[in-house]
Amino acid sequence: MAEELKCRICGANFSKEHTHCPNCLSGRHEECDGTLEPIAVWVKQDDTWDIILRCRLCGEIVTEAVCQDDNPIKIMSIASKPIASPPFPIEKLNEMTDLMGGNGTIDGYYYDKRK
C-alpha cells in the first residue's frame, strides 16, 4: 500500500504518489516547504486541465495536472471564480455591450482573434 500524507490545509489523508491533496487541491512546495494554494485552472490545447498553484511562502507559481480523483466541486469553484467575481462592476458589461452596438463590434469594426 502506498504511503499516505496528511494535508496541511484540510487534514485529508492522500497517497504520497499525488503532488497535491485531491480534496482541497493544496500541496507542498518542495523548494521552500511552503504551502501551494490553488488559484486557477488552465485548459491546455489537448483539452487536459492543470491546476495553477501559488506558494504562500515564496510566491512561485507552478502547475500540476488534474488527477482523476481530485474534488470536481473544488476544481469548478476555482474555474468559475473569475466569472463569479469579475474585477469590475457587473454594470460595465452593459456599458461595453452598448459601446459595441449590442453585437460584439466597436464602431462597426469586428475584431477576429484568429488573425
Image (spheres, helix red, strand yellow):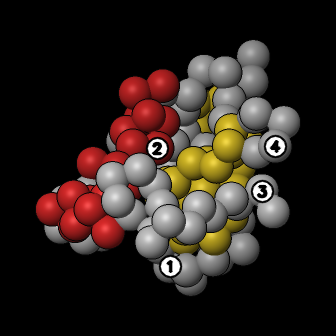
Q: Is residue 7 visible?
A: no
What residue appears at the point 48 percent right and 36 percent down from the top-left corner?
Answer: 75
Q: Closer to the N terminus: mark 1 or mark 3? A: 1
Disc 4 is placed on an element classified as loop
Q: CA distance from mark 2 to mark 1?
A: 23 Å
Residue under numbered circle 2: 79
Q: Closer to the N terminus: mark 2 or mark 4? A: 4
Residue under numbered circle 1: 57
Measured from the top left, where is residue 114 in percent x and y? 77, 56
Residue under numbered circle 3: 114
Amino acid on which the number 4 mark rests in the picture:
Gln
* CB-based contact (under 8 Å), mark 2 and mark 1: no
Q: Which mark is residue 45?
A: 4
* CB-based contact (under 8 Å), mark 4 and mark 1: no
Q: CA distance from mark 4 to mark 3?
A: 15 Å
Q: CA distance from mark 3 to mark 2?
A: 24 Å
